[in-house]
Image: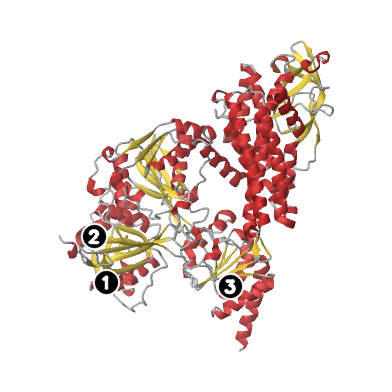
Amino acid sequence: MALSDYKGVYVFAQQTDNKVDGIALELLGKGKALAADLGTEVVAMLLGHEIGDQADVLAEYGADRVVLVDHPYLKDYMTEPYTQAISAIIRELKPEIVLFGATAIGRDLAPCVAATVHTGLTADCTKLDIGDFPMNPIPGKETLHNQLLMTRPAFGGNTIATIAIPDFRPQMATVRPGVMQKIAPIADAKANVLNFDAHLEKNDRYVEILDVVKKVSDYVDIQDAKILISGGRGMQNKENYEKYLRPLANLLGGQVSSSRAGVDGFGIPKELQVGQTGKTVRPKLYMACGISGAIQHLAGMEESDLIIAINKDETAPIFDVADYGIVGDLFQIIPPLTQMVEQELAKKKEV
Amino acid sequence: MKIVVCIKQVPDTAGGVKFNPDGTLDRSAMLAIMNPDDKAGLEAALRLKDQYGAEVTVVTMGLPKADAILREAMAMGADKAVLVTDRVLGGADTWATSQTLAGALRGLEYDLVITGRQAIDGDTAQVGPQLSVHLGLPLVSYTQNLKIEDGYVIAERLFDDRHHVLKVKMPCLLTALSELNEPRYMTPGGIFDAFQKEVTVWGRKDLVDTLDSDLGKVGSPTQIAKASDKVRKGAGTQHVAEDGREGAAYILEKLKEKFII
Amino acid sequence: MDFALSQEHLMARDLFRSFAENEVKPLAQEVDEEERFPLETVEKMGKLGFLGIPIPKQYGGQGCDYLTYAICVEELAKVCGTTAVIVSAHTSLCEMPILHFGTEEQKQKYLTPLAKGEKLGAFGLTEPGAGTDASGQHTKAVKDGDEYVLNGSKVFITNGYYADTYVVFAMTDKSLGSRGISAFIVEKGTPGFTFGTKEKKMGIRGSATYELVFTDCRIPAANLLGKEGQGYGIALHTLNGGRIGIAAQALGLAAGALDVSTAYVKTRKQFGKTLDRFQNTQFTLAEMAVRTEAARLLVYKSAWEHDADPKNDGTCSSMAKLYAAETASYVTNRAVQLHGGYGYIREYDVERMMRDAKITEIYEGTSEVQRMVISHNLLK
């Protein structure tokens, strides 16, 4: 079978507790654009148990079709049955592109699938395009059209590379959450569902789930926040986040987040961590307070529209990415700033 | 119990990344270290060794200078070390790397394989899972709190909002995160012993049941279309605050300028 | 001739450096300010084998050479003079005499737990009237059956109170002068062995410096180290090796102050430019660096000589101790000067380093004693 016979952009519709995750909708948004470029369809792969009702959600966010695998083994995420199911879909339906979220599930599942079906996989992409490979013609080498060009940062965001998979299908990528845009939902869209039997069979790679322990979290997803007031080692303790950062964040309608130093050192919840091992954020304003700016942190926030940094140390690397860097003591600066913002907002109200 | 830990030598980014005058990355200015997640994997293996008794073998694929991290691993307590190095293995993507490591591991005995979640240079987090597929081993990614019971591993598998407690039959493959344990220091005597020990050096011919078409650059499905060291957008304006109020006023002005308020 | 450190030594240096940075440096200011003995660090070092570096494995040690031990003390002293002297006194002054002069039983019973870091060691020679002139000992040991009865006191004892095992010197025969001195191993908790004043010091303030008091303290005759009358020789031999530890501590203080200053002058601005742009700064740093490196060469060479021949005449270790100590005082003093007003306040490390440095010119043989040893060997 020729590589050109592989058709369609497939998206893994990750779900948790039988509810489709936001990343699935983001992938559909991007998948739809890629499918348009290729003149093909975008298909969601929905795996779970008694999960059929979620198919329409996927249709609302742009899925032309939904491939549904409903099986008790797929209730909670487990590597092997999920790998079997996705691999079976790929072998039978032959998509040309398969996208996953770069989540704790997608980063486990995608490499296993790629290894099973023998194809390439590009991790943590921030940009996906359709184009030529090689990107600029090389004499004596055939230029392939309609290739998926996958751009990703490496080295904690210090290098970027664009990757292609010219000789294997499907072309696979994981995409960082928060990077792609979902489409405006299509009201009352109904899914075109294909019930797929993946012939799941228990083998030695199956594991047993003894317990599922959910973390109770009262935190708003920092990836959704337009404004983040973020603290680091310079905050000195957890209480100072509440005392200094929270009021300012509340005034601006934003959230409080943290560098890894705050998570490891002061017990700030991991959900609020920005950076390579935390979350990638792109708010309108990222205010870094007492964050030195380790490379792993910068990787998670440097795409923010406006970065303001307050740090005592004028050599702190955070200043290398900040639009405005203020050398000074955050404990001296933030209280009057909060007061001034409050006055400013009050003034606006009056007008 | 025999445990194999896969480790990788990577440039250190912790002390700050060094740039050339043109804004590109200066790789030669950075120290080569053991990848932090891999070190966490080694620590997990050494704790199992302390608790249950085990022989720990570290394996790396890399340049001959990767010998240094194997010595370090032995100075921390690993018993044996294997360096897989060969020109034909160069330029490998995760598929070809995982095939190479699978070829090496087929030549070793193991009840448990541990890898780091991801390397700080590539950041792909793919080699561990792909290795598990090639070897037909059950996989548990992002593990913590390992226990061994009657030929099974009981481990917590972390997700974004929860963890699963999993029971997995050995042999199996686990991936470890640097956030989850504090690797031990070497000991001075351990360092001197490590340099007395032999590092097994393997080349292409020592890889078991491996096809040339799965190795190195030739065997890599992914190809680089374009690579560049990212030029940082560069520092903006730096302002030294005279005092708290002055610094606050400066920020307020910027927030207004940028229509944040 | 090869001045390069071996791969082993380089890796060991990395180990000591990362331990110092991560575990020792964060406590250095607090330990100084509160005059607090850093027990938690000692415990960690014990577990990692830092308290038995040059001791053979058969006695629970790491089986490394003296150079590795010197590098350890140097790296610790770069960030904390207190921590460095704890290791130095324990290793050079307590473990080494037991290793060299102890019986097999004494090594098993005392050296092994010391080397494993389960026990801490100290050395009691100095008395109020017997400092530089150690032969003027007043503490007496009288044999009574299969016991010795100790009476007297020792002052300025590093690791005092916190140590479990003490190598103590006493007169067994006053009439023989220095040939009447003997060495003993005394355990903490022995009835009649108590601690007197804790000294309040200018520097190395976290190190515990205590008076040891012996009042009819009975110890087993089996705890005599070497033979009766051999004590003075044991003391001199021990101090020969000990000087290398203190020289390494002094070297570390100088190197640490140089590191801190080099970083500081790049950030501190005066007259619109950073300090490193001024020639005065550049020349001062150059002088500091030259002396530090010269000290390092002497310290490493004396450690290397000690490995080759532990019974050498001690000229090199005296040179190392003399030069490194004076370098530590000089370099830390210049470091404070480069820091200006900030160098004089406690928030900045160089203030502590300058206070810590002074003692290295005094203890384990003053600079004057070192000059005596060097010239004596030169003129004999």
Horizontally, is A152 left or right of C183 in the view? left
Which amino acid lies under the numbered mark 3 shown in the image of this protein?
Asn
Q: Residue furthest top?
A: C145
Q: From where the camera sits, is residue C120 visible? A: no
Q: Residue A188: horizontal and vertical position, in percent?
A: 32, 78
Where B13 falls versus A141 (above or below)?
Answer: above
Q: Residue A143: horizontal and vertical position, in percent?
A: 22, 66
Q: Nearer the viewer, residue A93 or C229?
A: C229
Mark 1 and mark 3 lie on one chain; the one further toward the N terminus is 1
Alpha carbon separation for disc pair 2 and 3: 47 Å
State yes or no: discs 1 and 3 in contact (Cβ < 8 Å).
no
The image quadrant of residue B137 is: top left
Residue for badge 3: A250
Secondary structure beneath label 3: helix
Q: Nearer the viewer, residue C341 or B76?
A: C341
Mark 2 and mark 3 lie on one chain; the one further toward the N terminus is 2
Which amino acid lies under the numbered mark 1 shown in the image of this protein?
Ala
Q: Residue furthest front?
A: C379
Horizontally, is C305 left or right of A205 in the view? right
Closer to the observer: label 1 or label 3?
1
Closer to the observer: label 1 or label 2?
1
For the image, the number of numbered tags is 3
Alpha carbon separation for disc pair 1 and 2: 18 Å
The image quadrant of residue C219 is: top right
Image quadrant where one finds the C terminus of chain C: top right
Circle 3 chain: A
Residue for badge 2: A89
